[in-house]
């Protein structure tokens, strides 16, 4: 596990992770076969851009406040098989991949929060974990609405 020496290290790590998520969702949007699929991934890329901007602002201003919320977990992603990103993947495969990615991001940030050496670092990681949990839930709801109900 990466060792962080300061809150700036934490924020730099998180900002980089958010940029990777932006790139991931933009790539999925680029390879999407349908306009609906493209829209879903473009909107998630935009949310990740907003997270990155929020983290950049926190780093610049040096202030941060967490408002913890309980995020529901449908656990749909727990029962999915691994999927690799490919240009012609189906909508359901893309959603599974996105759920898995958000679940992994949640676990990473949560584990980092547990290991945080001070309260501000812990709060930043818990907030990021909460955001990733919300994303996973949105993909699970999308999967439930447009894949499970159609089958």
Image (cartoon, grey):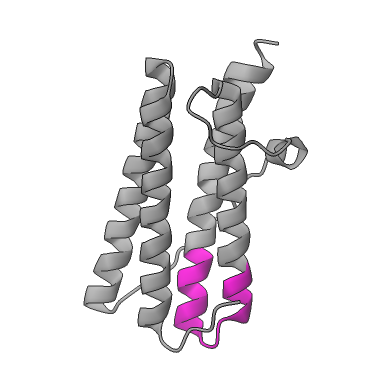
Q: Say if 42 sits above or below 32 in the image.
A: below
Q: Say if 86 sits above or below 131 in the image.
A: above
| Residue 80 percent coordinates (x, y) | 73, 35
Asked if residue 113 lies in the magenta stretch, the reply is yes
Asked if residue 21 lies in the magenta stretch, the reply is no
Residue 90 lies in what quarter of the image? Answer: top right
Q: Say if 4 sits above or below 59 in the image.
A: below
Between 4 and 145, which is closer to the camera in this rendering? 4
Q: Which span is picked out in magenta?
A: 111-127
| Residue 148 percent coordinates (x, y) | 68, 19
Residue at the image point whose x is 55% and y is 27% from the top: 142
Residue 72 lies in what quarter of the image? Answer: top right
Q: Where's the C terminus, which quadrant?
A: top right
Residue 2 lies in what quarter of the image? Answer: bottom right
Residue at the right extreme?
79
Between 42 and 55, which is closer to the camera in this rendering? 42
């Amino acid at each position: 596990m990466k060792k962080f020496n300061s809150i700036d290290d934490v924020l730099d790590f998180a900002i980089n992770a958010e940029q990777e998520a932006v790139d991931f969702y933009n790539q999925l949007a680029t390879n999407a076969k349908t306009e609906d699929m493209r829209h879903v991934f473009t909107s998630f890329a935009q949310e990740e851009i907003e997270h990155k901007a929020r983290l950049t602002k926190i780093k610049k201003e040096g202030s941060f406040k967490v408002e913890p919320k309980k995020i529901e977990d449908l656990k749909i992603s727990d029962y999915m098989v691994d999927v690799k990103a490919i240009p012609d993947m189906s909508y359901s495969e893309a959603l599974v991949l996105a759920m898995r990615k958000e679940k992994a991001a949640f676990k990473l940030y949560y584990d980092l929060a547990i290991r945080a050496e001070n309260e501000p670092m812990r709060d930043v990681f818990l907030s990021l974990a909460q955001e990733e949990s919300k994303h996973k839930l949105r993909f699970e709801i999308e999967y439930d609405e447009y894949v499970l109900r159609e089958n």
